Structure formats: C-alpha cells, structure tokens
C-alpha cells in the first residue's frame, strides 16, 4: 500500500497573522459593541437635531417589547438577553482556537469568587456614587438626556429580567470591550496607552445615545476598568462591579421613580 503523504504544517507570516487578528477583532466588534457605538452615534445626532433640549428627551434602557401581553413580552426579553450574549460565545470560541483556555485566559471564571466579589463591590461603590452625581450634573447642564433605566410593566418577572439584563450587559461589555479587546490590541503591538484610549473611547461611544454626559462618564469608567484589569489580570471583578452598578440602577429606578424629587423622570 502507498503511504499517505505527511501533513504539511503552514506557518503564517507575522504580518499575515496580524492581519487575521485585526480582521477578527473588527468582525467581533461589528457584531457587538462596535455596531452599538454606531447606532448610538446616529441616535445622538437624532436627539441633537430634535426640537427641545437634551434633558427634555428620554433614553429608555429596558422597555417593553409587547405592551399588554406579558408572556410574549417575557419571551422577547429573554430572547434579547440570550442573543446579546452570542458574541461572548464567539470570543470564547476564537480564544480556544488560538490555543488559549477560552475565557479563563481573561480571568472570566469562578476560581476566586470571594476575591472577585469583594473587589467588584468596592469598584461599584466608588464608581456608582460618583457616576450618579455626574449624571445629575450633566443633565442639569443640558448635556444629557433623561435616562430611564427601566420602563417594564409591573409583572412578576420584572425584577428577575432586570437582574438578567444587568448581568448580560456586564458580561458582554467587560469580556469584549475590556479583556478581549486589550488582549488583541496587545497582540497587534499597540502601546498600553493607545489600547487604554481605544477601549475607553469605545465604551463611551456606545453610551452616546444618553448624551455627552453618558459618553464622558462611561469613558472615565473605562479608564478605571482598564487600569484595574491591567493590575489584577482578571476581568471577573469588573464584571461583578458592572453587574452591581446596573442592578442598583435598574432596581433603584423601579422602586424610587416618582417617589423622590432628586431622581429625574420624563
């Protein structure tokens, strides 16, 4: 019998490898938060060109998909949360193909729950108080829309869905815009400062639909998160911090809107 030819292993030229990584990164962003940034820019232009000031307009984060039909609404809510996580699964697949241990290489795992929860809670406490004050000031100055964290009907699944939405936001943003993007930019030879600016500006960009205040506030948050990630080498504490921030924002608004004078409502 004739022997089978030996497999030929092809090694990519470094420039070709960088090109593949660059294309991969752009595709992941185009399927996730890069597209959100463009959508947010279009929304912001629409708000700027609409009669009236920004603070007289509202940006709703969690609204109803099927008013008056709670079970259909719930199905759409869960569908939206689930499909939003698909780019994270894509990132996990790409990292595994790279030879890394999937998302664990980014520190997205449950190996240090107490450590992650403690640091995440501290970050959330610091950013949450400063962020609320900045939002109120930006809105009062006319630089921000009135943010409506939730406008869901008063049904049994309201708070569970808000919690799931908060966790989904945290996982998608921190895995992709923080950990994955920094890893790829490092591999592409970007300087730490350039990578920090890219990640932070992108984070601010997809919050631009809230106004200039939303852009600046989230960009500053991005800088803090990049520095913390570089120091700790784990994304999980930042996922925890982001989830806690959104859970408090969504749940707090649901409980306090219309009952306290300092919380803006449409």
Image (tube, rainbow, N blue to C red):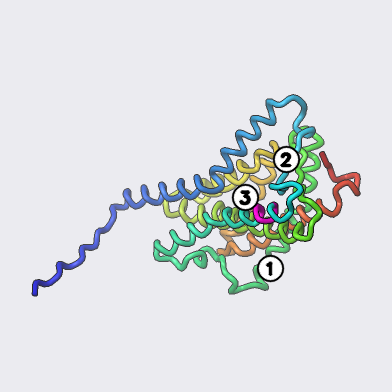
Label 2 or label 1, whichever comes before in sequence order: 2
Q: Which quarter of the picture shows residue 148?
A: top right
Q: Position of residue 80 (x, y in %)?
A: 62, 52
Q: Nearer the viewer, mark 3 or mark 2?
A: 2
Q: Could you give the CA–CA distance between mark 2 and mark 1, rounded to whole angstroms?
A: 30 Å
Residue drawn at (54%, 54%), measured in percent from left and top? 176
Residue neighbourhood size for the residue with mark 2, other residues' Cα within 10 Å, grouped as few (<14), some (14–19), many (≥20): many
Horizontally, is 116 left or right of 86 in the view? right
Residue neighbourhood size for the residue with mark 3, other residues' Cα within 10 Å, grouped as few (<14), some (14–19), many (≥20): some
Quadrant that contains the N terminus: bottom left
Disc marking residue 223: 3
Residue contact between numbered discs 1 and 3, judged by CB atoms under 8 Å: no
- The reply to whether residue 226 is visible in this rendering is no
Residue contact between numbered discs 3 and 2, judged by CB atoms under 8 Å: no
**Is 78 in front, or is 189?**
78
Horizontally, is 243 left or right of 130 in the view? left
Label 3 or label 2, whichever comes before in sequence order: 2
Magenta stretch bounds = 73-77
Horizontally, is 61 left or right of 223 in the view? right
**Is 129 in front, or is 169?**
169
Q: Is residue 74 magenta?
A: yes
Disc marking residue 59: 2
Horizontally, is 93 left or right of 214 in the view? left
**Is 201 in front, or is 43?**
43
Q: Secondary structure at mark 3?
A: helix
8 over 115 or under it: above or below: above
Residue drawn at (55%, 49%), measured in percent from left and top? 196
Residue placed under numbered mark 1 in the picture: 117
């Amino acid at each position: 019998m004739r022997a089978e030819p030996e497999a030929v292993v092809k090694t990519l030229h470094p420039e070709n490898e960088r090109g593949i990584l660059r294309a991969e990164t752009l595709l992941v962003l185009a399927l996730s938060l890069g597209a959100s940034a463009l959508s947010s820019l279009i929304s912001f232009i629409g708000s700027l060109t609409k009669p009236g000031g920004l603070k007289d307009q509202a940006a709703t984060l969690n609204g109803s998909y099927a008013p008056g039909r709670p079970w259909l609404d719930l199905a759409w809510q869960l569908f939206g949360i689930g499909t939003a996580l698909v780019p994270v699964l894509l990132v996990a697949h790409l990292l595994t193909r790279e030879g890394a241990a999937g998302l664990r290489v980014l520190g997205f795992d449950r190996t240090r729950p107490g450590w992650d929860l403690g640091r995440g809670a501290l970050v959330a406490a610091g950013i949450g108080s400063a962020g609320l004050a900045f939002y109120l000031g930006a809105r009062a100055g006319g630089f921000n829309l009135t943010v409506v964290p939730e406008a869901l009907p008063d049904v049994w699944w309201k708070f569970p869905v808000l919690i799931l939405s908060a966790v989904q936001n945290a996982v998608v943003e921190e895995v992709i815009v923080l950990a994955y993007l920094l890893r790829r930019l490092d591999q592409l030879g970007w300087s730490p400062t350039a990578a920090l600016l890219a990640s932070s500006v992108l984070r601010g960009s997809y919050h631009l639909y809230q106004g200039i205040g939303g852009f600046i506030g989230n960009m500053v948050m991005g800088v803090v998160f990049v520095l913390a990630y570089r120091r700790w080498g784990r994304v999980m504490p930042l996922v925890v911090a982001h989830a806690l921030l959104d859970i408090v924002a969504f749940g707090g608004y649901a409980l306090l809107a219309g009952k306290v004078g300092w919380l803006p409502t449409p």
